[in-house]
């Protein structure tokens, strides 16, 4: 019955049907699950609780005849006096002279409008005769498209709810409803559309939030379990002895956290199912070292490995360091967008004929022309910068390559479990020994002179500095102009004292490489740059990071930038130049000066900016929830995740209380609605 076409509801003709299709409503069920996105309150409150200038609703008795004054053409002002509690309240109505006849002395009426606390006066937008009925006090406001109005939807919804709400079946087991004190599905549905109080509405929402999260978590964990069971053997039988030799040869010994993560990854590689793991670790925690060891492990069983990174600079840098590490252990190749012509053909051929073991590259790695001979392991650095499709494309290059995603932007737990519920997670939560905490300062622009003097002082002691210029949203051109201007300005300021270099995204890759080499070799002491140096760049001798207009960056991004210094043994500094206007901006600068823990920062960032911004709008890959909000409702999310875990692990879906949930999951599965 619920799947009857929408025309089953009285009053829905062809035209309305078409309008409804625009908002994806085809069946009665679609309509019922089309939820309001907010509510207007017409709740009557005592006068002492009314707030000045807010929209309020009051109820009272008309005293005397309303008066109407006309002015101009067609313009009028009506004044009605109401007895409310023991006050006389003035109601003002513009251009509705006819209301005079409806508001008779002694009538009880309900007025809604803007409240003036000082004059005890309300500018009326809505009036109704009689007392306010409780079910009209909260009005649903639906998201709209096309020419359909809220009034129309409300009317249809009333019909649909009264005709069909009783046939909505419960899908959650009774035990869950009881232990979380959730209303049943049918009641909750009535309340979400036509709440009888804000309290009822709260519980209705709570129910649907939990339901949404639970289904989502069940789906992901179910898929994950099935994939693990079904994936045919890509068990990489790496040579443990050779891997250990490789580790021993490193110039440092691994931290405990690195060893633990490494063991988890190697176990995945060895096992028959396809690895799908996220490696999280703060900037400088030594993820790259772990990645190199894993890549080497795949070489020892005759497979190739790929490392995909978001920028060319980073690809080149990784290439240089891996080439050194792999000397005598494997052949390393580089493939980026700016490797063209003959050189490109050569590397593409080598990849195909297995003349290279490890390939480092950017998006260029996933182009059609690139085919691996036998790809065993793919590592994606800074994974949140890659879209879901790109990850998929790369994965499809090999038979069933294991995939490891790495990120130095620690993903808040809340998001990690919602977005990556289908992934295993390893965390490096320990820094190599001997690192000093970076000191962070927040200054206003008028301190610039002192900042520059400070740079000079550090340079005199043999160190180097980055200066990151303001970022201008949506205009790479202006960004670069800014960088160029700042470069000239600083070159002039430091003339004869120290060397200044310039780095930005529009430089040709040879130019970038040259600048990076100059900086790495300390032939340039100050590097002016846009955010292209944000991730991964490693020059241990740099001790100062100055960020202009720091308020324009996200906390995680600032943390990434800050991570460019403090990579050697010397004390390092991060100076944020910012003059934020709002409280949130100031708060963010304070947080930066107080916290150097990336996980903590990313949680805060998420709280302040919301999940969309956190990952960058386009490629967020974040699931969309109808009622739930991963940040706001994270407790419910955790509960749902735990419950889903129990259900999947203990195979409860087979049991009668879970029957409906299983049906729903199977339906979703048929739609091919899987996560990658
Ligand atoms: P990440 O990729 O996590 O930001 P890297 O792997 O680039 O970190 O490591 C940062 C620096 O620390 C590098 O110079 C690396 O050689 C060094 N390093 C990595 N692991 C260790 C360790 N266990 N002990 C000392 N130094 C380490
Ligand atoms: Mg790294």
Image (cartoon, rainbow, N blue to C red):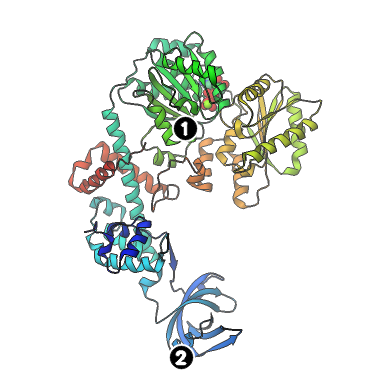
Q: Position of residue 663 (x, y in %)?
A: 22, 46
Question: Residue 169, how many percent across, how many down?
Answer: 23, 56
Mark 2 to mark 1: distance in Å? 70 Å
Crowd around label 2: few <14 · some 14–19 · many ≥20 (10 Å): some
Report the front residue among 430 and 656: 656
Residue nearest the observer in this picture, 89 or 229: 229
Q: Decide: is 584 above or below 259.
A: below
Q: Is residue 28 visible?
A: yes
Q: Nearer the viewer, residue 373 or 517?
A: 373
Q: Which residue is mark 1?
A: 383
Q: Residue at x 40, y 22 (%)?
A: 377
Q: Name the residue at 34% across, 59% down.
A: 204
User: Which disc is residue 105 wearing?
Assistant: 2
Q: Position of residue 454 (x, y in %)?
A: 75, 32
Judge from the rendering whether residue 49 lies leftward or rightward of residue 154; answer left or right: right
Q: Quadrant of residue 527?
A: top right
Coordinates of residue 616 in the picture (x, y in percent): 51, 41
Give the total number of marks visible in the rendering: 2
The answer to whether any part of residue 139 appears in the image is no
Quadrant location of the N terminus in the rendered image: bottom left
The quarter of the picture showing ligand 1: top right
The residue depicted at 39 percent of the width and 27 percent of the height is 395
Tell me if residue 311 comes above or below residue 601 in the rendering. Answer: above
Q: Are marks 2 and 1 in contact (CB under 8 Å)?
A: no
Can you tell which of label 2 and label 1 is closer to the viewer?
1
Left or right for 655, reference 531 = left
């Amino acid at each position: 019955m619920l799947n009857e076409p929408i025309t089953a509801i009285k009053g829905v003709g062809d035209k309305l049907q078409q309008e409804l299709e625009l908002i994806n409503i085809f069946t009665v069920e679609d309509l019922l699950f089309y939820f309001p996105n907010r509510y207007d309150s017409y709740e009557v409150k005592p006068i002492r609780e009314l707030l000045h200038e807010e929209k309020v609703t009051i109820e009272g008795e008309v005293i005397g005849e309303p008066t109407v004054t006309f002015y101009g053409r067609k313009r009028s002002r009506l004044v009605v006096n109401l007895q409310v509690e023991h006050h006389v309240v003035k109601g003002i109505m513009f251009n509705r002279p006819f209301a005079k006849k409806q508001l008779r002395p002694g009538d009880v009426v309900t007025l809604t409008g803007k409240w003036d606390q000082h004059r005890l006066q309300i500018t009326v937008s809505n009036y109704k005769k009689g007392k306010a009925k409780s079910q009209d006090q909260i009005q649903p406001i639906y998201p709209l498209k096309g020419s359909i109005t809220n009034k129309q939807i409300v009317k249809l919804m009333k019909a649909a709810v009264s005709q069909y709400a009783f046939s909505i079946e419960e899908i959650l087991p009774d035990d869950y409803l009881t232990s979380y004190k959730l209303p049943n599905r049918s009641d909750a549905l009535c309340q979400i559309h036509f709440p009888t109080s804000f309290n009822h509405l709260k519980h209705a929402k709570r129910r649907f939030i939990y339901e949404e999260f639970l289904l989502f978590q069940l789906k992901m964990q179910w898929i994950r379990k099935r994939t693990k069971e079904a994936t045919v053997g890509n068990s990489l039988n790496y040579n443990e002895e050779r891997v250990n030799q490789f580790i021993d040869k490193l110039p440092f010994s691994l931290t405990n956290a690195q060893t633990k993560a490494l063991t988890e990854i190697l176990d995945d590689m060895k096992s028959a199912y396809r690895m799908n793991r996220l490696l999280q670790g703060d900037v400088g925690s030594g993820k790259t070292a772990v990645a190199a060891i894993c890549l080497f492990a795949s070489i020892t069983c005759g497979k190739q490995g790929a490392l995909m990174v978001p920028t060319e600079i980073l690809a080149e840098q990784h290439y240089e360091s891996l080439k050194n590490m792999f000397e005598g252990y494997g052949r390393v190749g580089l493939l980026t967008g700016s490797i063209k012509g003959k050189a490109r053909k050569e590397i593409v051929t080598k990849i195909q004929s297995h003349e290279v073991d490890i390939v480092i590259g950017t998006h260029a790695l996933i182009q059609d022309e690139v085919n691996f001979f036998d790809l065993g392991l793919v590592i994606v650095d800074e994974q949140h910068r890659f879209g879901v499709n790109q990850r998929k494309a790369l994965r499809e290059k090999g038979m069933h390559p294991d995939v490891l995603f790495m990120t130095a932007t620690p993903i808040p737990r809340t998001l990690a479990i919602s977005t990556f519920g289908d992934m295993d997670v390893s965390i490096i939560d320990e820094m190599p020994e001997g690192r000093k905490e970076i000191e962070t300062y927040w200054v206003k622009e008028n301190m610039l002179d002192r900042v520059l003097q400070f740079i000079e002082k550090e340079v005199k002691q043999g160190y180097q500095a980055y200066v990151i210029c303001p970022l201008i949203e949506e205009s790479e051109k202006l960004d670069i102009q800014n960088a160029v201007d700042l470069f000239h300005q600083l070159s002039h300021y430091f003339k004869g004292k120290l060397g200044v270099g310039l780095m930005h995204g529009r430089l040709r890759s040879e130019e970038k490489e040259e600048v990076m080499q100059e900086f790495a070799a300390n032939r340039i002491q100050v590097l002016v740059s846009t955010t292209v140096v944000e991730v991964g760049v490693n020059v241990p001798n740099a001790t100062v990071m100055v960020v202009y207009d720091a308020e324009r960056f996200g906390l995680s991004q600032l943390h990434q930038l800050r991570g460019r210094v403090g990579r050697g043994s010397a004390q390092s500094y991060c100076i944020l130049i910012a003059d934020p206007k709002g409280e949130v901006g100031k708060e963010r600068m304070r947080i930066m000066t107080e916290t150097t823990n990336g996980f903590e920062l990313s949680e805060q960032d998420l709280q302040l900016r919301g999940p969309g911004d956190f990952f960058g709008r386009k490629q967020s890959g974040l699931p969309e929830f109808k009622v739930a909000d991963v940040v706001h409702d994270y407790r419910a999310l955790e509960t749902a995740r735990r419950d889903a875990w129990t259900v999947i692990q203990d195979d409860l879906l087979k049991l009668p209380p879970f029957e409906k949930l299983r049906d729903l999951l199977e339906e979703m599965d048929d739609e091919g609605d899987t996560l990658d």
